[in-house]
Amino acid sequence: MNYAEWEKAVPPEITGDTLWKVEAYRLALFAPVASGRLSCSTAHPKGQRVADLLAFCVEMLHHYAPEISSSIVNISLAAGSPDQI
């Protein structure tokens, strides 16, 4: 499943949230799906290094996703309106 397919399959309870407008939030939600696709890139000679780097980035994004979401909400509330994201 690629990002576009995944995005279409996300339930309206999530896509209806104001945070859905933030690309970083969507990517953080997609990260666990993307990490399952890393093995396909290891066939290329440099693929393992690329896959390792991507796995690290995905792991970090997934790990910090709750903090990122919380920060986005706090910034939005400080701005006065969640619709200003």
Image (tube, helix red, strand yellow):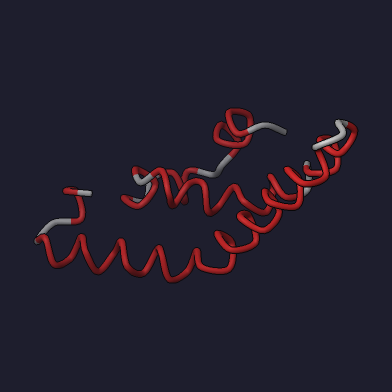
Which residue is pictured at 19% across the width and 48% down the height? 83
Q: Judge from the rendering whether residue 67 lies leftward or rightward of residue 51; answer left or right.
A: left
Q: In which quarter of the image is residue 3?
A: top right
Which residue is pictured at 80% across the width and 37% down the height? 46
Q: Is residue 6 above or below residue 32?
A: above
Q: In this view, does 65 lie above or below 29?
A: below
Q: How far across and how far down the image is residue 79, in percent?
A: 11, 60
In this view of the protein, which residue sits in the foreground, 13 or 76? 76
In this view of the protein, which residue sits in the foreground, 45 or 5? 45
Q: In which quarter of the image is residue 34?
A: top right
Which residue is pictured at 34% across the width and 43% down the height? 21
Q: Judge from the rendering whether residue 60 lies leftward or rightward of residue 19; answer left or right.
A: right
Q: How far across and how far down the image is residue 57, in percent?
A: 61, 55
Q: Quadrant of residue 1?
A: top right
Looking at the rendered structure, the number of numbered marks drawn on it comes to 0
Which residue is pictured at 16% across the width and 48% down the height? 84
Q: How far across and how far down the image is residue 28, in percent?
A: 53, 53
